[in-house]
Image (spheres, rainbow, N blue to C red):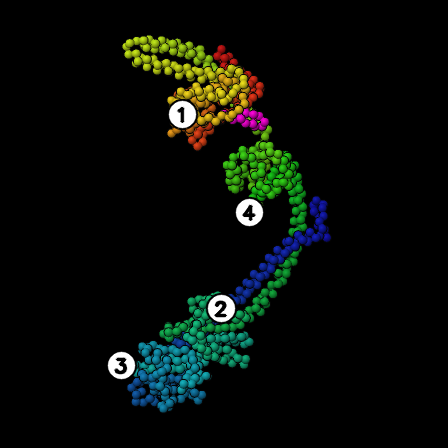
Amino acid sequence: MFHKFKSGNTCQSKPLCLETLKFFIPSLLLLAIALGIHYAVIVHEQNLLIAQEESLKVEQTRKKLEQKILRMQADTLRFAELVGHQTEKMTTNRDALARQFSHIMAFKPQYMQVRFLSSNGAEKVRLERTINGVSRQLNHLLQDKSHRRYFQEGIVLQPGTVYLSPLDLNVEWHSPQPEKLTMRMATPVSADNGEKVGLLVINYDGVALLKELLSVFEDTQKPSTPFGTFRLVINNFTVEFTRSDDQEIQFTLLESEEDSLDTKFSSNRRKGPDGGQVWQPEERLTTYSSLSPLDGIANSTWWVSHSIVTGRMYKTSSAFFGSLPLYIALLIILGVGSRLQAGHRLAARHVQDEHLHQLTRIVELSPSAIMLTDSDARIFYTNTAFTQLTGYQSSEVKGYTPRFLQSSTTNQEQYGKLWDTLKQGKPWHGEFHNRRKDGSLFWEAALIFPIRHPWSRQTCYVAIKQDISNEKALQEKLKQETLVRFHQEQLAKIGRMANMIAHDLRNPLTSIKISLQMAQRRAQNSVDQPSRHDTLWGLALNQVEYMERILDDILNYSSQGQLHVQNLDTNMLLSRIIDEMQGPLRKAEVSVNWSLAPQLPTMIADPARLRQVFQNLLNNALQATESARGERFIGIETRFGLENESPYLMVTITNNGKQMDGHTKNNAFEPFFTTRAKGTGLGLAIVKKLVDRHGGQVTIDSLNGIVQVCVVLPLCPTSEILTESSDRSGNALMYAVNEEL
């Protein structure tokens, strides 16, 4: 048999059968569970019916027994009251009392014995029922009962109260009578004057009483119904009634263990405060109930129990098998439904496979790099574009995390934010600066999002990436051009300002300086307080010279003249600058720590410009040590290096002055930025500009109480750098001049 799909493809019967079984077997299990539940419900209902019936019978028996005991109590009290009125006659003539006892026993067939005992326990009158009727015991056969428990507990009772004994065998002359199951009830007898004169004891026929109670458990409509076992437990005595094969009811008197029935059934499945039920092996149900005769005057709890073999398995099976046709019909429906569902699912699966194949083809041929990872970020799929982007084959990266792509340029905080976003179930957009298999770096834009399986808690992650290295390069180039244009515009502004200062301030300032110098010389030649005038003119000249230095810095920064390069010995240049600074260094008590590399090669550079660079840096270091505590020092180190086959010289100048914060380090080389009260803020800006013109780099850092400036210069800058620097400076300055004109 074949199953046809809409697409025209055919599927053999074997897959169809397997798919049918996938639906039929679970459905069959569900049906079996339903059968089990149905059977359990039937069993439970049968148990409830049997338990309710047994509970009702035991409860009826308990109430019947209570009523019997209450009537026995009432009869005993009335009988005792009658005997109390005849106490005077009893002392002279016991025959009258015996006749009274005989008359009462004639109407009370359940009375087996009626006795009157004196206050010391001796029998005075005793009548008992025999086969021939009621007979009186002869006087010489009367016994002393003072040692019996019923006398000892009954004689001390208050008038109007009754002692009730448990069921046991009647004992005559210390010999139990096996056929006489007896229940005794005793009450004190008082004369009319209230004096206690003796004890009235009535023995009730226990067998007759219990047979009357057992009528509750006999099924007159179904004589074949099992009678079971009836028990009456009083203290440590148990009376057990069963029915023999000839339908005769027999009793057995047992002496129970010390554990009461209440303790024995304390762990039963169903139990109330006064009774309960328990299922025992072989389908035996025991139902029991308690009662306190005479409202607890008997100082004991009586238990009535009935055990019966229920035969519930047969009843349950009969009710259960009556529902089998319905389950067979359901089984047929499940088989047909599973067959239809299997065909539909195979057709739907074929369509899904086609869609999945198309989607896989699209992902594989996508121009974007696609990477799939499991919940632990381990790669299990990459497409062709990923291999083209990174150089890694799919088989090389399976089972690994994408960490092998990371470069040290990406901030770790970015990865932390990435995982925080993904754990919230949100997509993450960002960029990575990663490393290819060949070691080259590249930029990529990434979209990463989690996919959670609907039937489990497993999550996989999808990363879609595009190479944006060219875009990044264009952005960087545009940024550099924008920065150059910005600096050119600033340079043009400074050029205009420098021209203004040169034309409008330089000449008047020179005139002022000459006038002050002439006035100072006249003051020195004067005899009228020469020292005071000399101090004032000197202060004024210092301020003029300070203004000239400001003008010099501005003109130096705006000056973009051509570099005059030649071979330069860097160690010698630094030594000369330090020699010139010996005076200020000794005055400030600053020591210089030298670490000049021996045989340092000469470099091609403009000596005047580099002299200005190192002089500015050393002056700044000297000023920075003013805030140092303890010993003040300046360190100078030179060394030769090689990077990418390009030689360079590195000059490092350090001091133990004031530490720099992040804001100061980031803006230290910006024009007009300063942290001192005096100064133009152009010193380090001039240093950076001159180093850049030589094709070098300058950096500043502050760590562990040391401020360090590092200047890196190429040993031989290319002519393109020098020409470009000269042309750029000239163009900027020409622009400023043109603006001024």
How packed mark 1 is, by other alpha carbons closer than 10 Å (few <14, some 14-19, many 20 or more), is some
**Which residue in the rendered view is the most extreme toward the left?**
193
Amino acid residing under circle 1: Val
Mark 1–mark 4 Cα distance, whole angstroms, equals: 69 Å
Q: Amino acid at mark 3?
A: Asn
Instruction: Identify which residue is drawn at 32% across, 10% down.
Output: 524
Instruction: Name the residue located 57 percent from the left edge and 48 percent from the top edge.
Output: 455
Q: Residue at the spot x=56%, y=35% of the render?
A: 407
Residue position for label 1:
590
Q: Of the residues shown, which amino acid type is indicated by label 2? A: Val
Can residue 604 be spotted in the picture?
A: yes
Q: For numbered disc 1, what is the local secondary structure?
A: strand
Point out the residue furthest to the right here.
1
630 on left or right of 58: left
Label 4: element kind: loop
Residue contact at pointers 1 and 4, CB within 8 angstroms: no
Say which of marks 1 and 2 sits in front.
1
Q: Are marks 2 and 4 in contact (CB under 8 Å)?
A: no
What stretch of residues is rendered in magenta?
A: 639-651
Mark before the other along the chain sequence, 1 or 4: 4
Q: Secondary structure at mark 3?
A: loop
Up/down of 735 relative to 170, above or below: above
Dot placed on the residue nearer the N-terminal end, 2 or 4: 2
Q: Residues within 10 Å of mark 2 (few under 14, many from 20)?
A: some
- Residue placed under numbered mark 4 in the picture: 457
What's the amino acid at mark 4?
A: Arg
Q: CA distance from mark 4 to mark 3?
A: 94 Å
Residue at the spot of label 3: 193
Which numbered disc flags the more N-terminal residue, 3 or 1?
3
Q: Which mark is residue 140?
A: none
The image shows residue 301, relative to residue 96, as above or below, that is above
Residue 227 pos. (x, y %): 52, 75
